[in-house]
Image: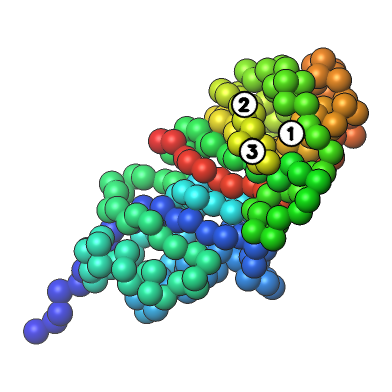
């Protein structure tokens, strides 16, 4: 008698990862990526490669606390068992924190309504052995009030072309930033930004510009002119990747 085939399921994965060893999320011809590692673990379970679609790409060296992805396949186990199986096969710097069978129409990227990113800065004249992989070390004291004043000018619906990586190809660079908060926790300065979508390197470019405000090199009111210029050269530098975390994706 022919063995009954497992039904096709659409699985939603929530993942956290330390991006230091990876060239970002998306699979590439050469180099390790998070997507490649996850797809290899799934291949071992299904016996064939199945594409895993994430809510969005994270760049080389960027971390995630709750990246969301989905994959379709005839999985021979329930969600809880699949969670354990995947974690037993993934490298220690990638973890699946939740597995959930979803309706067939669910799409991790197309159904995402908003995302929250966090950027961490170690603001001290002394380096930290522990924060070096998860923060940008900025020695100069930062003017948090000035940074908050500048951040307020970036909230709302704007054309963020000045904060988009050069040579990016998108239909529109208009995004709606719902909130942009800056908090100091001891020696750590945290920038949290929530928006309906993000352009390539947008958060790191905003963080780099806000740090220049904090250093006193850019006046807070100059943010308005940067937005109106729609020119990457008019904004501040790109913050390094290790301080950036994808925190949450909303559906």
Element type at mark 1: helix
Q: Nearer the viewer, residue 88 or 161?
A: 88
| Circle 3/circle 2 CB separation < 8 Å | no
Q: Residues within 10 Å of mark 2 (few under 14, many from 20)?
A: many
Element type at mark 2: strand
Residue at image coords 15%, 79%: 3
Q: Position of residue 111 (x, y in %)?
A: 44, 38
Check the image and report above or below for 214 versus 14: above
Of discs 3 and 1, which sits in the foreground? Answer: 3
Q: Earlier in the sequence, mark 3 or mark 1?
A: 3
Q: State the CA–CA distance, disc 3 to disc 2.
A: 20 Å
- In this picture, residue 74 sits left or right of residue 140: left
Q: Position of residue 220 (x, y in %)?
A: 81, 19
From the image, tell me which residue sits under label 2: 180
- In this picture, residue 116 sits left or right of residue 119: left
Q: Which mark is residue 186?
A: 3
Q: Which mark is residue 206?
A: 1
Q: Is any atom of residue 200 visible in this view?
A: no
Q: Position of residue 69 (x, y in %)?
A: 44, 53
- In this picture, residue 76 sits left or right of residue 178: left
Element type at mark 3: loop
Q: Nearer the viewer, residue 153 or 250?
A: 153
Q: Residues within 10 Å of mark 1 (few under 14, many from 20)?
A: many
Q: What's the coloring here?
A: rainbow
Farthest residue, direction bottom: 1
Q: Residues within 10 Å of mark 3 (few under 14, many from 20)?
A: few
| Circle 2/circle 1 CB separation < 8 Å | yes
């Amino acid at each position: 008698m022919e063995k009954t085939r497992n039904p096709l399921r659409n699985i939603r994965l929530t993942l956290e990862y330390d991006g230091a060893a990876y060239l970002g999320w998306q699979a590439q011809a050469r180099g390790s990526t998070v997507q490649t590692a996850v797809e290899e673990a799934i291949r071992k379970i299904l016996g064939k490669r199945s594409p895993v679609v994430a809510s969005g790409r994270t760049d080389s060296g960027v971390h995630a606390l709750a990246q969301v992805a989905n994959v379709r396949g005839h999985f021979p186990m329930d969600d809880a068992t699949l969670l354990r199986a995947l974690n037993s096969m993934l490298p220690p710097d990638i973890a699946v924190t939740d597995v959930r069978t979803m309706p067939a129409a669910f799409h991790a990227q197309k159904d995402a309504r908003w995302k929250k990113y966090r950027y961490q800065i170690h603001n001290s004249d002394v380096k930290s052995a522990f924060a070096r992989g998860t923060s940008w070390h900025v020695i100069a004291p930062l003017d948090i009030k000035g940074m908050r004043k500048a951040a307020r000018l970036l909230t709302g619906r704007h054309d963020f072309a000045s904060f988009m990586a050069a040579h990016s190809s998108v239909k529109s660079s208009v995004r709606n930033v719902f909130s942009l908060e800056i908090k100091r926790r001891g020696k750590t300065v945290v920038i949290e930004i929530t928006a309906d979508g993000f352009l390539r390197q947008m958060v790191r470019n905003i963080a780099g510009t806000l740090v220049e405000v904090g250093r006193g090199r850019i006046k807070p009111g100059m943010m308005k002119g940067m937005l109106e210029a729609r020119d990457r050269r008019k904004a501040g530098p790109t913050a390094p990747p290790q301080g950036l975390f994808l925190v949450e994706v909303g559906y």
